[in-house]
Structures are given as C-alpha cells and as structure tokens.
Image (cartoon, grey):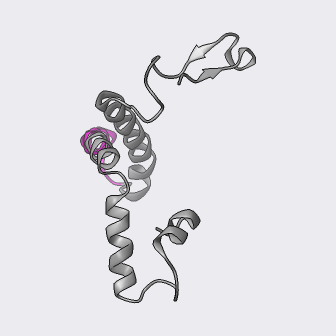
Amino acid sequence: MVCWLTEGDFGGLIRLHAIGKGPNDISNTALFVGGTVGAFLICIAVLPLVRPGPRWARILDETLLRSLVGGVLSIVGWNLGPWPGLALWWMQHSLNLTLPGDRFEYAFVQGRG
C-alpha cells in the first residue's frame, strides 16, 4: 500500500513511503532521526525556561545529548509496541487504581491505557 499526497497539497504527487512497504514498516534510521529532531526541538524550547542561568553553549550541549537519547528511545518505544502500556495498566488494575469494571480494551480506546 502506498500513500500519496494529492496534487493540491504540494503541487504534485508525493509518495510518503516506499512501494511494497506499509505505513507501519518504518526503518530504525527514520525512527532515530525523527526522535532526535523531536527531542531537540522540545529540549531547545524547554531548557532555557527551566535553566535560565547557563550560557547557550551549555544548553546546546545538553540539548544535543538529550536529543540522541530521544532518538534511541524512539527506536526502543516503537519496537516494544503496546506491551509496556499493557503491563502498566495491569499493575494499576491490580492496585485498584482503575475504574470499577474497567477493562484494558476500554481504557486503550479511551486513551487511559
């Protein structure tokens, strides 16, 4: 299955992923780059607010290090899938921290899982 953007979006047809691969077949390189860029943007926006004292060079060094960690965590999180969330929900359920009569399927659909 191939996803295409329509002609009106960017002036032509653009393939979003390779032919023969589904949208869930994402390479680890793409995950790492996406996680690194996302973590960089979040850190560069938040760290100056949290630590106003250090110079920009220190903030940039810390941001780059945390961005690499974000890239690695994106690969780990994608490959683990829903299993950590399921384990956490079962732990909450066994400690009676969920709603009475609540099931994982309902919590997963409603965004509480």
Q: Which residue: 38% across, 31% down?
A: 26
| Between 88 and 49, the one nearer to me in the picture | 88
Q: Provide residue 20's location: percent of width, then percent of height.
A: 44, 20
> Would you place residue 11 above or below residue 41 in this image?
above
Give the residue at the far right of this rendering. Answer: 8
Q: Which residue: 31% across, 39% down?
A: 60
Which residues fall within the magenta stretch? 53-69
> Would you place residue 42 above or below residue 53 in this image?
above
Q: Is residue 58 left or right of residue 99?
A: left
| Between 63 and 6, the one nearer to me in the picture | 6
Give the residue at the far top of this rendering. Answer: 12
| Between 91 and 67, the one nearer to me in the picture | 91
Q: Which residue: 35% across, 56% down?
A: 51
Q: Provide residue 15's location: percent of width, then percent of height.
A: 55, 17
Q: Provide residue 5's location: percent of width, then percent of height.
A: 65, 21
> Would you place residue 56 above or below residue 2 in this image?
below
Taking the magenta stretch, the answer to whether it contains residue 56 is yes
Q: Which residue: 52% across, 81% down?
A: 102
Q: Quadrant of residue 56?
A: top left
Q: Is residue 66 left or right of residue 16?
A: left
Q: Main secondary structure of the magenta part?
A: helix
Taking the magenta stretch, the answer to whether it contains residue 98 is no
Q: Is residue 105 left or right of residue 73?
A: right
Q: Is residue 52 left or right of residue 75?
A: right
Q: Quadrant of residue 86?
A: bottom left
